[in-house]
Image (spheres, rainbow, N blue to C red):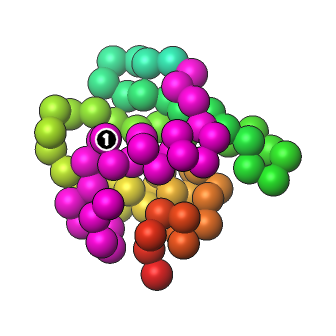
Amino acid sequence: MPKGVLNWKFSDVTAVLRENGFFLNHIKGSHYFYVGYIDGKARQACVPKHGNVAIKPRTLKGIIEQSGLDKKKWGLY
């Protein structure tokens, strides 16, 4: 798993989501929508897949917010 918010790939992000109970709900184009339940609430996180290109830090922060997971579970901070 990458350190910080740099160099995260699609596979890294989806691995963390799946480890925390998220599952693939649907795909629309190059965006994969994962759904999970955090603290009894349904959460949806949209993860872009653009080949083997790193996800931009600001996009990763948005995915983290959408998921509702603690930053410690992402290995951040």
Number of numbered markers: 1
Q: Position of residue 70 (x, y in %)?
A: 61, 66
Using the image, determine if residue 22 lies above or below residue 2: above
Question: Image height check: is 74 above or below 3?
Answer: above
At x 81%, y 53%, the residue is 39
- Residue named by callout 1: 11
Q: Is residue 70 left or right of residue 16?
A: right
- Left or right, 5 with respect to 62, comes to left
Q: Is residue 44 visible?
A: no
Residue at 54% x, 72% y is 72
Image spot of residue 24 (x, y percent):
52, 25
Question: Which residue is the extreme one toward the bottom?
Answer: 77
State whether residue 28 is above or below residue 8: above
Q: Amino acid at mark 1?
A: Ser
- Local secondary structure at mark 1: helix
Q: Is residue 67 left or right of residue 39?
A: left
Give how far across and how far down residue 65 sits, in percent: 56, 58
Residue sitting at x 57%, y 30%: 23
User: Which stretch is magenta?
Assistant: 1-25
Question: Toward the viewer: 2 or 29?
Answer: 2
Q: Is residue 49 magenta?
A: no
Q: Is residue 21 magenta?
A: yes
Q: Quadrant of the N terminus?
A: bottom left
Using the rendered image of the protein, determine whether residue 12 is visible from the camera's viewpoint: yes
Q: Position of residue 6 (x, y in %)?
A: 24, 66
> In the shown orientation, is residue 29 left or right of residue 74?
left
